[in-house]
Image (tube, helix red, strand yellow):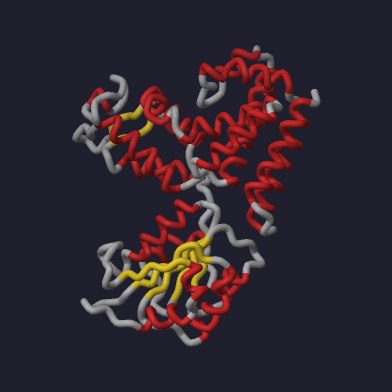
């Protein structure tokens, strides 16, 4: 069965007892792992319990297909249900899971992690059609979902971002859930350490005020803490693309991939950047100067990028920006559905946009 987005949280808290195996897949591998761990904890109290958690890779299953059924049938030495946790699954193990699900599974729970699987993926279709299997797609957070993650993660520490800080975080996080959480935890630690600026949480000890309100974390706190993180790599990709700097784009794109950013996350970062140029040009059409148009953006353009951003405003026209944004939308759809290597498709699209930037 396919678990719809509106049902995912409820399913993760309380999986359907009829489901013998759950497939988690998608471009956001951090979210895949986060949700897998949440499912494991519905069965066991310790993710590393050697008696009740057995971990395999897809290659292990493919090399020894009977091991899946054998492990799923085993009883725990300490009592209770067991979890069989499969990482790096691919379509190559579809026949093994087809046999497993046809036989009805066992009382133990099988959790399967995979990367991006297109609509024609045999593994994905198998889980979606089986009454004993469940399929959950894991995609990058949209702005609304990311705001919720930011609010909840910082809120657990008695912190709350200001509007500018929130906008910056939404602009620069979200391509990978585990990276997002890691950056937010780092920000919370920074704020609670007392090293944040006086207007943020650090200046107030980083705790609630006793009246149920969280202390604010300002933009300066965010910039000081995560300004040099993966967000900067995405900025480098976006600015190189919009400037028509193909060599710079190649370097920044490779670095972003090495830091764990997904191709779709990169596409969305470039899309947000082009939308900001589009918005700024709209302000210019309304009578604003380039400087006032940039100042009117939220979050504001980082100082070191102001000269580049102004140059890009002069380089791009709104109709050409619309064409570039359409290319990005098409590329994201292709990454999710065609099975074509996502990094290659993403890079090809950004190169086309960079070429358009040079063709004034």
Residue that appears at 57% across and 74% down: 94
Question: In the visual, does 238 lie left or right of 303?
Answer: right
Q: Residue at x 21, y 32 (%)?
A: 209
The number of callouts visible is 0
In this view, 281 is above or below 185 = above
x and y percent of residue 121 in the render? 63, 67
Q: Residue 350 sits in which quadrant? A: top right
Residue occupying image coordinates x 39% and y 77%: 17
- In the image, residue 76 sits, relative to residue 53, either above or below, namely below
In the image, residue 105 lies at what x, y percent? 44, 82
Residue drawn at the location 52% of the way across and 43% of the way down? 261
On the rendered image, what quadrant is the C terminus found in?
Answer: top right
In the image shown, does 320 or 148 lie closer to the viewer? 320
Camera-nearest residue between 32 and 77:
77
Residue 196 lies in what quarter of the image? top left
Residue sticking out furthest to the left: 210
User: On the picture, is 132 further left or further right than 321?
Assistant: left
* Residue furthest to the right: 359
What x and y, as percent, mark residue 223? 42, 25
- Residue 12 is situated, as x and y percent measured from the top left of the image, at 40, 64
Front residue of this view, candidates 301 and 243: 243
Which residue is situated farthest in the front direction here?
Answer: 63
């Amino acid at each position: 069965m396919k678990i719809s987005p509106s049902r995912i949280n409820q399913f993760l808290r309380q999986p359907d007892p009829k489901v013998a195996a759950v497939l988690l897949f998608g471009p956001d591998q951090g979210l895949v792992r986060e949700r897998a761990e949440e499912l494991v904890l519905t069965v066991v109290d310790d993710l590393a319990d050697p008696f009740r958690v057995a971990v395999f890779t897809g290659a292990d299953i493919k090399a020894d297909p009977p091991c899946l059924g054998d492990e799923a049938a085993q009883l725990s030495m300490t009592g209770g249900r067991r979890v069989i946790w499969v990482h790096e699954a691919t379509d190559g193990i579809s026949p093994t899971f087809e046999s497993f699900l046809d036989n009805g599974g066992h009382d133990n729970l099988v959790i399967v992690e995979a990367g991006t699987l297109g609509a024609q993926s045999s593994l994905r279709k198998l889980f979606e059609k089986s009454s004993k299997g469940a399929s959950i797609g894991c995609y990058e957070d949209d702005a609304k979902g990311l705001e919720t993650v930011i609010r909840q993660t910082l809120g657990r520490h008695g912190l709350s971002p200001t509007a500018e800080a929130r906008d910056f975080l939404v602009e620069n996080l979200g391509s990978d859930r585990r990276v997002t959480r890691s950056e937010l935890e780092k920000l919370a630690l920074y704020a609670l350490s007392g090293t944040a600026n006086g207007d943020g949480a650090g200046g107030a000890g980083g705790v609630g005020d006793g009246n149920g309100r969280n202390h604010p974390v300002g933009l300066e706190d965010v910039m000081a803490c995560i300004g040099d993180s993966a967000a900067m790599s995405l900025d480098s990709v976006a600015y190189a693309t919009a400037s028509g700097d193909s060599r710079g784009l190649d370097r920044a794109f490779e670095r972003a991939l090495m830091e764990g950013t997904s191709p779709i996350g990169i596409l969305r970062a470039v899309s947000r950047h082009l939308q900001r140029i589009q918005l700024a040009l709209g302000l210019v059409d309304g009578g604003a100067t380039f400087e006032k148009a940039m100042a009117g953006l939220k979050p504001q353009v980082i100082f070191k990028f102001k000269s580049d951003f102004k140059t890009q405003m002069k380089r791009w026209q709104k109709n050409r920006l619309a064409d570039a944004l359409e290319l990005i939308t098409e590329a994201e759809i292709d990454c999710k559905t065609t099975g074509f290597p996502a990094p290659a498709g993403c890079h090809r699209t950004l190169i086309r946009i960079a070429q358009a930037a040079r063709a004034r």
